[in-house]
């Protein structure tokens, strides 16, 4: 991922970090995040963050940010 995407942080995480403060940040790994229920995902799909709905989506859309790839298949419907 480009540097700016590698530094992406899931919306709604708290507390906010003050400028100049130290914090822990995962830059790799596998994470369980909410997804759009009406989508089927396959391993390797690009995954995007839908900040308005606070969930992941496999269809790029205006305002979505790519955050990684799908590592386990997910049926429709699932969340």
Image (cartoon, rainbow, N blue to C red):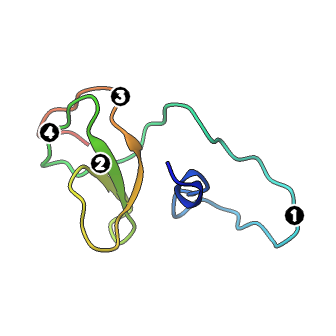
Mark carried by residue 40: 4
Pointer 1 local density, CA inside 10 Å: few below 14, some 14–19, many at least 20 = few
Tag 2's secondary structure? loop
**Circle 2 is placed at which residue position?**
35
Q: Give the quarter of the image for residue 8.
A: bottom right
Disc count in the image? Answer: 4
- Please state the horizontal and vertical placement of residue 42, each as a whole percent of the image: 20, 31
N-term mark: 4 or 3: 4
Please say if the residues under marks 1 and 4 sit with CB atoms less than 8 Å apart.
no
Q: Of 60 and 39, which appears nearest the observer?
A: 60
Tag 4's secondary structure? loop
**Circle 3 is placed at which residue position?**
71
Spatial CA span between label 4 and label 3: 13 Å
- Please state the horizontal and vertical placement of residue 37, each as a whole percent of the image: 19, 48
Pointer 4 local density, CA inside 10 Å: few below 14, some 14–19, many at least 20 = some
Q: Return the residue found at the far front.
A: 2
Pointer 3 local density, CA inside 10 Å: few below 14, some 14–19, many at least 20 = some
**Circle 1 is placed at which residue position?**
21
Please say if the residues under marks 3 and 1 sit with CB atoms less than 8 Å apart.
no
Spatial CA span between label 1 and label 2: 31 Å
Drawn side of residue 18 relative to residue 61, left or right? right
N-term mark: 3 or 1: 1
Drawn side of residue 25 relative to residue 8, left or right? right
Q: Nearer the viewer, mark 1 or mark 2?
A: 1
Q: Give the quarter of the image for residue 13.
A: bottom right
Residue at screen point 52% across, 54% down: 2
């Amino acid at each position: 991922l480009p540097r700016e995407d590698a530094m992406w942080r899931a919306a709604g995480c708290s507390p906010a970090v003050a400028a100049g403060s130290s914090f822990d940040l995962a830059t790799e790994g596998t994470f369980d995040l909410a997804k759009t229920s009406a989508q089927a995902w396959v391993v390797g799909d690009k995954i995007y963050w839908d900040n308005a709905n606070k969930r992941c989506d496999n269809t790029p859309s205006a305002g979505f940010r790519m955050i990684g790839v799908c590592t386990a298949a997910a049926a429709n419907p699932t969340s």
